[in-house]
Amino acid sequence: MSFVSVTSGTPQPSTRWRRFRIRQPRRRLYRYVRRRWRVLFALVDAIGYLLFFPWWLRRSQALRRCRVPGARFLLVQLDRTGDAILSTGLVQALKQLFPQARLDVLCVPWNAEVFQALPEVDRVWVMPTSRFARAGRGSWLRELWRWGRLLRRERYTLGIDPRGEAPHALLLWLAGCRVRLGFACGGGGFWLTHRAKFEPQVHEIHRRRELLAALGLDARGLELRPRWPGRATPPRQFRPGPEAGPCVVCHVGAGTQAKSWPRPYWRQLISWLLQAPRATVYLVGGPSDGETARQLQKELGHPTRLHDATGQLTWSELAGLLAQAHLCIGADSAVVHLAAAVDCPVVALFSRTNQAAVWRPWGRGVVLQAQVPCGPCHREQCPVPGHPCMSWLTPQRVIQAAGLLLKRGIKDTKVPCVEATSGEFLLQSQASKRYNAADT
């Protein structure tokens, strides 16, 4: 991936940001940003490794069971839909390496459709909730214990946690998996029999490759690229016509407020997109994004070329629409990961809640991110007035990136032009090392 520094319009540090500054060491055992979580899991792990030491003596002999015909594998994916899409390549690789094994997936309702579309998955277990649920957060611990005991009857040979969460490692232990594979970066590594190497700055796809390497497998020739097989056809009203011009899908929502792009910015961008002859723009998102889409339709007009599809498409239907689109523009969410999985060029608008180099879509496109002093913060609500990391992503910058991918020139812009070639791009503002200790 090519890193290109954008010098003009760099966010300027302000004294009001000092209270929101995030300090991180260059190297750390845990991936948690806040010190209290690192200290807590360090204490938990210190006690756990002493108690579970006898089980570690038998871990070298357990790996042979994975190659036995009829072995049963369990993949635990209880997080967001974008993470599940990134794991689709891992599912295909496991089936290629162990063709005689049975592969089951434990997921949650909002990402179950991802694994139900994969022919390599033999069974999909759907857990009602997890710690990533917006409501009912107190019940996920009871569900974790209940599902651990239920899955124990299946006698799984191998359990995999691609995220690196202490509750997921506990679930694998409760389920009685003989071989438990994951990362120790989230704590609870003493519940695992095999721990993969955790690199904080590498992409999630490479981390999944490390999972296979921890089993002693050579995964260099395997394709771990996310994919979406069996694309469904979108409804008739959301199908681009044969004589239509550029088709652009805009995800006007985001998973959290801290990742959202302002609506006035969307209005300027969509207005520019509709200037192209016969261009068609589809607004996608969840039911909560419908009000934003309706306001944009009311302000911009163009009833025949600006379509509101928020809350009306399944993931399979959205994949079919993205497969026909020329470009997808959206915040850091599952939609841009799905677009990359169906080989649709992407303009991803990243806030500083996390590292774009780790979570960017694995495909063709441009990633825009501002290096503000308060990130990465991993917050759901931005506490800084003005939301600087997203306000830096002005419509002119996004138009510049979209024009590169649509092969259209943009006049009167001060953003430096970057030649678009095959591969991925990351356009970032320069980090202010005086304030941003996390990026030094």
Image (tube, rainbow, N blue to C red):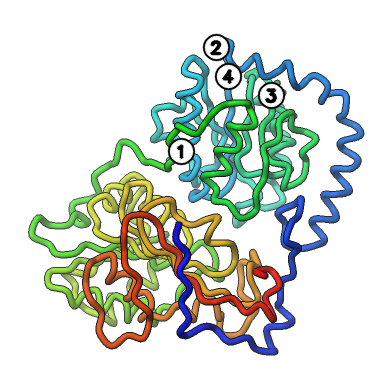
Amino acid type shown at disc 4? Arg
- Residue 30 x %, y %: 75, 52
Mark identifier at residue 179? 3
Q: Nearer the viewer, mark 3 or mark 4?
A: 3
Badge 3 crowding class, 10 Å Cα cut-off, few under 14, some 14 to 19, many 20 or more, is: many
Amino acid type shown at disc 2? Gly
| Location of the N terminus (image quadrant) | bottom left
Q: Residue at x 53, y 55 (%)?
A: 359
Q: Residue at x 69, y 31 (%)?
A: 172
How far apart marks 3 and 1 lie (CA) works out to: 22 Å
Answer whether labels 1 and 2 touch (C-beta < 8 Å).
no
How far apart marks 1 and 4 lie (CA) works out to: 21 Å
Left or right for 147, reference 36: left
How far apart marks 3 and 4 lie (CA) works out to: 11 Å
Q: Secondary structure at mark 2?
A: loop
Amino acid type shown at disc 1? Leu
Q: Secondary structure at mark 3?
A: strand
Answer whether labels 2 and 4 touch (C-beta < 8 Å).
yes
- Residue 31 x %, y %: 70, 54
Badge 1 crowding class, 10 Å Cα cut-off, few under 14, some 14 to 19, many 20 or more, is: many
Q: Is residue 282 visible?
A: yes
Mark identifier at residue 224? 1
Mark identifier at residue 70? 2
